[in-house]
Image (cartoon, rainbow, N blue to C red):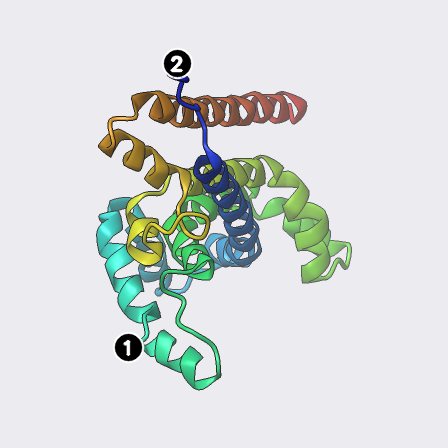
Amino acid sequence: MATEPQMLDEADLAALWITLKLAGLTTLILLLLGTPLAWWLSRTRCRLKVIAEAIIALPLVLPPTVLGFYLLIALGPHGPIGKLLESLGGRPLAFSFSGLVVGSVFYSLPFVVQPLQNAFSAIGRRPLEVAATLRATPFDRFWSIALPLARPGFLTAAVLGFAHTVGEFGVVLMIGGNIPGETQVLSIAIYDHVEALEYAQAHWLAGGLLLLSFLMLLAVFSLNRRFAVGMR
């Protein structure tokens, strides 16, 4: 008697864990790197600001495979970063989880920096100037004034960065390949199931990602609305 095929096998669960781990780590790194960068972009009057904003926004218009290709060249054994790591006793980052993290940070950068920059810009200069008249240091003004007022931006940045990383395909495939248990993420696992005509498994994974994305966006809109009402 034929048995029903299992909906999710061990490889799918491993891909789920790798995806969540990748998205969580990438989001944390982007918040740490993106916060000072967004703060600088929101305050500076430097002429290079436009160039910096254009570079940060590149992943929004650049095909993922193009970004993944150049990252693969840079991180591979014959690339500058790969050669540097080998000379230091390490190994190239291509086709490894660490390489996925590097690629995800580059690919999701605008989804974290831009909401933070908009949140910092919306604060304006007056609250910070008032704090300065009370002898607050620049760090105190940032920590006590800017960060609390920019909470909605941090929430939006964290959710968008996480969700965008979860949905990556082209970049992670170029840099990490498709190694089950090591670099295979959910988007690639869905593609493999569809290619093998295993639509039931593909439905489970795709439906889960669809539900997760919807719930995350719903949480962002609901919480941002509460913040807006609370600040009136």
- Is 74 on the left or on the right of 93, as rendered? left
Q: Position of residue 208 (x, y in %)?
A: 45, 24
Count of numbered marks: 2
Real-space CA distance between mark 2 and mark 1, rounded to the nearest whole angstrom: 53 Å
- Is 90 on the left or on the right of 194, as rendered? right
Q: Position of residue 225 (x, y in %)?
A: 57, 21
Secondary element type, mark 1: loop
Q: Which residue is mark 1?
A: 78
Q: Which residue is mark 2?
A: 1
Residue type, mark 1 in image: His
Q: Residue furthest right?
A: 134
Please say if 186 is above or below 134. Answer: above
Q: Of residues 27 and 11, which is closer to you in this image?
A: 11
Query: Which residue is at 40% across, 17% downward?
Result: 4
Please say if 62 is above or below 152. Answer: below
Crowding near the residue tagged with mark 1, few <14, some 14–19, many ≥20 C-alpha atoms within 10 Å: some
Q: Looking at the image, is mark 2 or mark 1 nearer the viewer?
A: 2
Residue type, mark 2 in image: Met
Secondary element type, mark 2: loop
Query: Which residue is at 37% across, 25% downward?
Result: 201
